[in-house]
Amino acid sequence: MTSEELFQNIRKKTSFLCVGLDTDFNKIPRALLDTEYPVYEFNKRIIDATEDLVVAYKPNLAFYETLGAAGWMSLEMTINYIRKNFPDIFLIADAKRGDIGNTSKMYANAFFRSLDFDAVTLSPYMGRDSIQPYLSFANKWSVILGLTSNAGSEDFQQLRISGDEFLYEKVLRAAKEWGTIDNTMFVVGATRADHMRSVRKIVPEHFLLVPGIGAQGGSLEEVFSDGSNNRCGLLVNVSRSIIYADGTNRFEITARQRAIEYRDQMEALLIKAKLI
């Protein structure tokens, strides 16, 4: 999927919503525990309830890896279900890998060949050779950590390294040269809205994956105002506020209602910006 195809899907669905499938076994409704793969059943119902409202899903691999073989099977089943039924959905592996050499190549093979994700989140702090193996795959994306929403981002990412330049700005300037706008995007936390304009100056045409809306308190309006471009250029991720909005066995109904609320806000912003 190219960046233009991603934008056209945003226009078609009047939404730039990405739902994070951070499916915690301990939080899913007890009624699902009688099924063979409860995590997959939870995901399937969330997907069926929201697929027309979203452009992307982002499983967080930690929630699957912690369950061992059963968790990995649930992840594979989730991917296969989306691929078979909703092929226009953009699939992001939230893995935050960052190794080099043969290890990096094996990770790339795992996410892009074995699991058939469209994209994977990556840490760039070991340099170009930690990202390059992923960029060698046609029609696949590297989602590079730029400025994250956690408090610890101040430890390194927001260090001033020369004059007024932050370390994260140096990383963005370097990393944007490794790929193109059709295979590289950057993670920028919604709680860092005060830095969003500086990010856009450095990567004006790239897509940004933006977590931190909803439970983490980021403002959708501020993110769009400071972070959008002439092709929207945003995938805004919401996880807990949608998938855990209701703890009963009617959870997917409430999840859909929450997703509609986000889609409606996004549609209004896209209309105001004359992007649809």
Image (cartoon, rainbow, N blue to C red):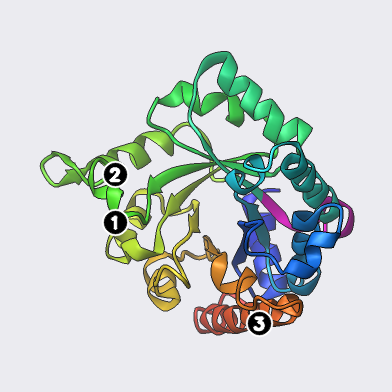
The reply to whether the C-beta atoms of the residues labelled 1 and 2 are less than 8 Å apart is yes
For residue 260, which numbered disc appears in the image? 3
Give neighbour class at mark 3: few <14, some 14-19, many 20+ (Cα, 10 Å).
Answer: some
The residue type indicated by label 3 comes to Ile
For residue 169, which numbered disc appears in the image? 2
Vertical placement of 11 versus 207: above or below? below
Please name the residue shown 57% across and 23% down the image.
104
**Residue 6 on the magenta span:** no
Q: Is residue 241 left or right of residue 78?
A: left
Give the residues drawn in magenta, as a range: 83-91
Q: Nearer the viewer, residue 223 or 191?
A: 191
Look at the numbered disc 1 and give the secondary structure of its residue: helix
**Residue 90 on the magenta span:** yes
Mark 1, residue position: 198
Task: Tell me residue 175's x, y (percent).
Answer: 42, 35
Separation (CA) of disc 1 from disc 2: 8 Å
Task: Tell me residue 145's x, y (percent).
Answer: 43, 44
Q: Quadrant of residue 133?
A: top right
Query: Mark 3, mark 2: which one is toward the viewer?
Result: 3
The residue type indicated by label 2 comes to Glu
